[in-house]
Amino acid sequence: MDSPIIICAAIAFASYIFGSVPWAYIIGKMNGIDIRQHGSGNVGATNVMRVLGRKWGYTCFLLDFLKGFLPLAAVKILIGMKIISVPLEVALITAAVAVVCGHIWTIFLKFKGGKGMATGGGVLVGVAPYSFICCGIAWIIFFYATRYVSVASIIAAALLPVSAYAFSVAGLWRTNTSIQIFLLVLAVLAIAKHHSNIKRLLNGTEHKFEKKKS
C-alpha cells in the first residue's frame, strides 16, 4: 500500500463512490417521488428545492456540498498524519476529480447524476477557497438579478479559473499550474452540463425562481 499509484487509485475509488451517493434521488424517495420524473428532472439540489421546497433543497445542497469537501479534508488529514505518503497536490486533484465524476456520473443511477455545482463548491473550499468565495458572491448577485439559477451557475463557473489565476498572480492564494488546469476543466464541465439550460434560456423557456408574494 506504499505505492503512490495504489494509494491514488484507492483515493479515486473511495472518492468516486462517496460522490456517487445521489442525495437528491434519496430525498425524493423519502418524499415518495422519483426526482428524475419531476421538475427539470435533474438529480440536484435546485430541482429538489423546486419540487419539494426550500427545506429539502437546502438539505440536498449541504449534503452534495459535503460530498465535495469531506474527501479532500480526509486526504489532507491522512497526509498530515503521515498515514499515506503521496504528494498533497496529486492526492487532492485525484480526490476532487473522482468525487465530481461520481456526482455527475453516479454508478447508482446508471451513470446519470447531477450537474456538480454544489459538489464542485465543496471541492473548491479544499483547493481554492478564495475562488469559492468569489464565485459564491457572483452566484448570489446574478441569481437575485436574474432569478435564474442556471445563469448564476454558468457565470460562477466561468469566473472560477479566471479568479484562481488572478488570486495566484496577486499572491493572495497561490495555485500551481496543475490545479489551475483542473479548475479550468471543472468550469468547462460545469458549463457543458448546463447545455439544456442554455437552450431553454435562448428559447425563453428556462425555469425562473419567482419571488413569493407575501
Image: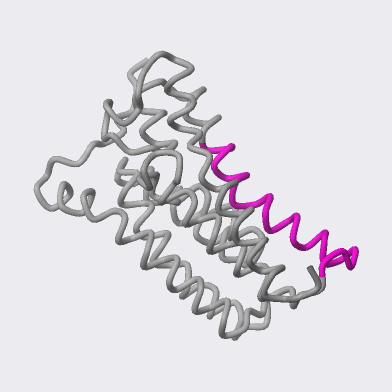
Question: Residue most toward the left?
Answer: 203
Q: Is residue 99 left or right of residue 82?
A: left
Quadrant occupied by the C terminus = top left
Q: Is residue 117 left or right of residue 134?
A: left
Q: Is residue 22 left or right of residue 77?
A: left
Prevailing secondary structure of the magenta residues? helix
Position of residue 121 relative to residue 144, above or below, is: below
User: Between 64 and 159, which is closer to the camera in this rendering?
Assistant: 64
Range drawn in magenta:
61-84
Horizontal and vertical percent for residue 180? 53, 78
Residue at 54% x, 42% y is 64
State which quadrant residue 128 falls in: bottom right
Position of residue 148 relative to residue 131, above or below, is: above
Horizontal and vertical percent for residue 190? 38, 59
Position of residue 106 relative to residue 58, above or below, is: below
Horizontal and vertical percent for residue 176? 62, 83
Residue at 48% x, 27% y is 26
User: Between 124 and 139, which is closer to the camera in this rendering?
Assistant: 124
Residue at 45% x, 48% y is 140
Question: Is residue 62 rendered magenta in the image?
Answer: yes
Q: Give the colouring mode of the picture.
A: one colour
Quadrant occupied by the N terminus = bottom right
Question: Is residue 149 rendered magenta in the image?
Answer: no
Position of residue 83 relative to residue 39, above or below, is: below
